Image: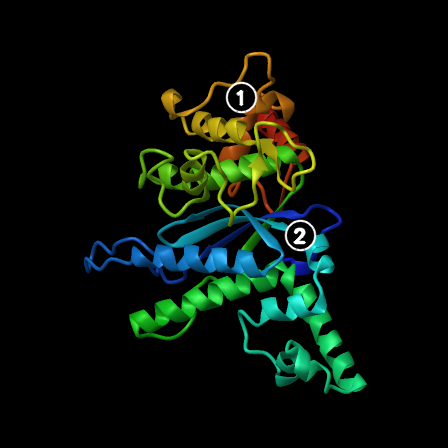
Amino acid sequence: MPRPRKSLINLNDTSYYHCTSRCVRRAFLCGKDKQTGKSYEHRRQWVEDRLLLLADVFCVDVCAYAVMTNHTHVVLRINKSKANSLSDSEVIRRWHKLYKGMVLARRYLIPAEQQTLSEAEIETVKSLAQVYRHRLYDISWFMRLLNEYIARQANKEDDCTGHFWEGRFKSQALMDEAALAACMAYVDLNPIRAGIADTLETSSHTSIKMRIVAAEVKTQPAPLLSLKNSLGDAETDALPFHIEDYLGLVEVTGRYFHPEKRGKISQTTPGVLSRLGLNTESWQLMVTGIESAFATSISIEELNRRRSRLLANRTG
């Protein structure tokens, strides 16, 4: 029996989560149907555009994503502190980018109209803003507004009705930095593992391609949660990995090397694997087991338990 969503997403444990959505009835999200010859490739852009729009509205940061033939992967960070820092007006404005909203709330956003509202009406709007504020850092709402939109678009194009996605999206809590790095790499390498891309640069509709395109002009993609810059600015709200380290890590993990396009990390700087306390064997075990070996959470502790079970099976 599926566990309640509230038990799978707990900010007291972690703010990072890996979410996966899969199509039902072997439906095509994207790709090309070999039997009919019909191409659904344009839907990849639907998903990417919608995902990045929601990232701009919600206080949920996109760390990594990949749009595949019949499923999507996203690694998200819940930014509750950002949601709590927004004014009531900003919360309402954000929500109105997705929904028309109540007339009372729309009047509240117009200074001249706001002056005419009674105390009771203003309190109603403030209560409504609190409901919206909570939704803005709720992964379930984020995934709902992503998947429902794509389902409606796809069903309209296919001229059919009914479920497009398999029930609820799958969620895994990323309990430590190693789990976060492994899961991001796993997501970014999906097209290569599936044989639909040969290099990271040609992995269309993925976060790794977006990061590489930005890195080529010495910047970072605004829609994604940034990686640390080469100066290691501790005050920057960013992922806990340096750009050079992460891009190199994904390449090594994918067994693809393109050294002339990457800066060289100093030999005196510890690599990301050693900083995370993992050797190469452990790292590969963690990445390859993201969906098959881990259930609702991913961590070094869970990895060690898995290794112990594998060792016991071998010796038994």
Q: Residue furthest right?
A: 119
Evaluate if marks 1 and 2 touch, with contact meaning CB atoms under 8 Å apart: no
Up-down relation of residue 252 to residue 19 (above or below)? above
- Secondary structure under the numbered disc 1 in the rendered image: helix
**Label 1 Cα crowd, 10 Å radius (few <14 / some 14-19 / many 20+):** few
> Residue 3 appears in which quarter of the rendering?
bottom right
Q: Give the number of callouts.
A: 2
Up-down relation of residue 5 to residue 288 (above or below)? below
| Relative side of 168 to 299, left or right | left
Question: Circle 2 sits on which residue?
Answer: 79
- Secondary structure under the numbered disc 2 in the rendered image: loop
Quadrant in which the C terminus appears: top right
Specify whether residue 229 is in view: yes
- Residue 73 location (% of width, % of height): 48, 49
Residue type pointed to by label 2: Asn
Residue at 62% over, 82% down: 102
Depth check: give the residue in front, 35 or 51.
51
Q: Residue furthest front?
A: 112
Mark 1 to mark 2: distance in Å?
32 Å
Question: Circle 1 sits on which residue?
Answer: 280
**Label 2 Cα crowd, 10 Å radius (few <14 / some 14-19 / many 20+):** some
Residue at 39% over, 20% down: 259
Pair 1/2: label in front: 2
Depth check: give the residue in front, 108 or 84.
108
Specify whether residue 4 is in view: no
